[in-house]
Amino acid sequence: MTDDADDELTYADTGVDIEASESATAALIDAVGDSEGDYAGLLDIGDRYLALATDGVGTKLLVADALGDYSTVGIDCIAMNVNDLVAAGVRPVAFVDYLAIDEPDDDFAEQIGEGLAAGAETADIELVGGETAVRTEVVKGLDLAGACVGLADKDGLFDGAAEPGDTLVGWPSSGIHSNGLTLARTATTRDHEYTDPCPFEGYETIGDALLEPTRMYTDLLTPMRAHGVRGAAHITGGGWGNLQRLGEHRYVVDDPFDAQPVFEFVQEQGNVSDAEMHTTFNMGTGFVAALGDDTSATALAEATDGRVIGHVAASDEADAGVGVSIRGLDL
């Protein structure tokens, strides 16, 4: 291993600065005007809310391109959108995609279409159209994004705010999902190729592990509503910092799901710190909900594949502060 490979790698080192990204997003919002909603934009249409979310696959597409396997990135595209709607308490209903390419290719377009169809079936939504644009001078390779629309009754939305003393229920991720891939790719290719045999079980190659499709959490919407969830967080870009979207509290996560082997491999190959891993990736837990009643939280966990993973620090807990405590880290 070279001296460069021994250096500690951060997300910013790979070209993705979360703080700069958030600043740019804030500037955009200031320019166009704020809107109601967090994970999804909400439009009052009378007796219900119409909700919209948009997201893409990101540099996971570069792994797909390297392997020549685009069959699952359509699933990721839908998952990243519907999960944001679910975090708001919204039922996803329809999706449109936007595929930008440098030149037409029937084979990869068909593969992407198959992934979108599979994702729509899992999410129980309709694919109602999209756009395929040839952008030879703008795009190198391809880019895939989409937008999802959902509906929610006025009393169906989550409040979106946790309270001190709340119980946290979490659900496992399927792996890296579709965030932090720039860091994961840079780390894993320091001494390896995507086509190298995977050093842990479950995958043929390293690239296959990185391409594991993002889990969808649409099946949790009904039980979360039934058990009185206050708010939910999709553990996406920014890792465990997403809990702060539920309010500025101290979130004590003392029993998270185990991180899958792919995270350990990324950390070892990139010499990535524990804190950087937890503020970039989901580290095994992809979705979290806050409930005000311990009994309801336990019942929700038992009714699904979740479990109680922690709590929101009570206001009288000494030096609670603001942030996330997990695996000995204070983020």
Image (spheres, rainbow, N blue to C red):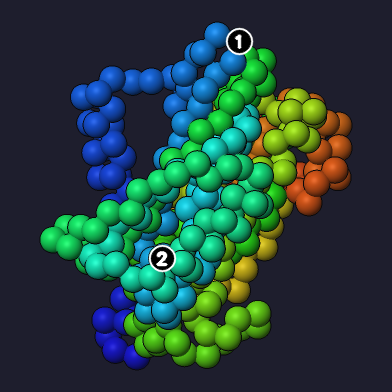
Q: Name the residue carrying label 1.
A: 47
Q: Is residue 73 above or below residue 304?
A: below
Where is residue 115 shown, x and y percent of the image?
53, 61
Looking at the rendered structure, the kind of residue marked 2 is: Ala
Nearer to me, 20 or 318:
20
Question: What residue is at 66 percent from the left and 37 percent from the top?
Answer: 289
Q: Is residue 100 visible?
A: yes
Q: Nearer the viewer, mark 2 or mark 1?
A: 2
255 or 148: nearer the eye? 148
**Percent position of residue 21, x then y:** 28, 45
The quarter in which the N terminus is drawn is bottom left
Q: Amino acid at mark 1?
A: Asp
Task: State the CA–CA distance, disc 2 to disc 1.
Answer: 39 Å
Q: x and y percent of residue 81 in the render?
A: 50, 44
> Going 47% across and 18% down the picture, which residue do you hit?
43
Task: Name the quadrant containing residue 324.
Answer: top right
Which residue is at 53% across, 45% downward?
127
Other residues around mark 1 within 10 Å, as few (<14) / some (14–19) / many (≥20): few
Q: Is residue 147 above or below residue 195?
A: above
Residue located at (23% from left, 65% from top)? 102
Q: Residue 78's x, y, as percent?
A: 52, 50
Q: Which residue is mark 2?
A: 109
Front-most of residues 284 and 37: 37
